[in-house]
Amino acid sequence: MPVFIDILWLVVGLVALYFGAEWLVGAAAKLAVRFGISPLVVGLTVVAFGTSSPELFVSLQFNFEGLPDMAVGNVVGSNICNIGLILGISALMYGLSVKAELIRRDMPILLITTIVFVWMIWDGQLARWEGIVLAVSVILYTVYCLWESKREKNPEVLKEFEDEFGAEQAGNSPLWLLIVMILGGLIALYFGAEWLKKGGVSLAVRLGVPSAVISLTLVAFATSVPELATSVVAAMKREGDIIIGNVIGSCIFNILCVMGFTAVITPMAVAEISMVDLAVMGAFTLALLPMMLTRRMIGRLEGALLLLGYFGYMAFLYVDRIAPATAAII
């Protein structure tokens, strides 16, 4: 029964995070469009940030509670989940064509961001000054997105973002309702992070599994649900640019924004995140580059390979860390 209660907290936290992100992203996107911000900018900044909000709330919560390994594991696991699981499923459904030059230019930024982050965390610590560098970088990245969006001329790309985030989608919701939804989303994200932390930590202690593993797997998947929902819907509409932009943007925001502001508030020292975890995140990121540049398409075969890599990593975590830990208790 106690294990069931822990799982229940995880599920309740997941539901709260999902709806919190949905309310926040939906209302913020509509509000931005109503104030005259272009759908392309909304898709590349507001939505990318909003879908990363669960990671931000959860990592802040973990770090406040003195659980830096879970805070870092949440981001590392989320980026692996974003590329391996979410992009893999989306590509397996229909195949994703990469038309946007803007999104292709984001790929080097993700690679550099990942390399710098791995270098920073390699010594087992993320200092406040390193957090400041990451936090300032996310501001510069957002400014860069705004500047680049003014140069985007591809009509197909513009139409995709107009269909997804344009004035028609903004609807006629009253201003007060959008504000209530944003506030409600923030409240749901706060409590969702608290409940997810409560269930995840308790489950890790009860089963004897390293807390970082719970964060790399269950927590990372839970906080990536908004990206998964957004990407699956976009895949059904054949909106490959939105899916890839969402995944790349979210991965960048996870490192720069989530890790940056979390480390600024409280510097982190990690012990349970292994070099293997960081190498897997880097390998998934690096694997995207040839997929996107060869045929300018992430097809079903590539999607299958990404999924295989993701489940292979999950299997590795089970054999290497979960099974030995639970066996020691039994």
Image: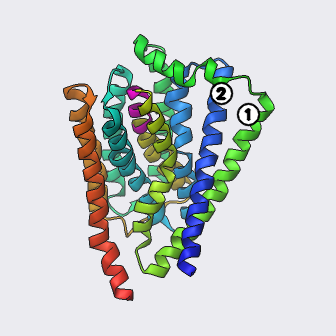
Which residue shows up at 42% across the image and 51% down it?
78
Give the CA separation, mark 1 to mark 2.
Answer: 8 Å
Q: Nearer the viewer, residue 88 or 143?
A: 88
Identify the mark at residue 328; answer none if there is no mark. none
Q: Is residue 228 magenta?
A: no
Task: Tell me the quarter of the image containing the C terminus.
Answer: bottom left
Q: Is residue 244 magenta?
A: yes
Residue 254 appears in the picture as rendered = yes
Identify the mark at residue 178; answer none if there is no mark. 1
Q: Which residue is mark 2?
A: 30
Q: Is residue 301 above or below residue 74?
A: above
Which residue shows up at 44% across the image and 13% down it?
151
Which residue shows up at 55% across the image and 50% down it?
54
In the rendered image, residue 281, in percent from the top left (x then y), is placed at 31, 51
Q: Is residue 208 above or below residue 107?
A: below
Under circle 2, the secondary element is helix
Q: Which residues are magenta?
A: 239-247
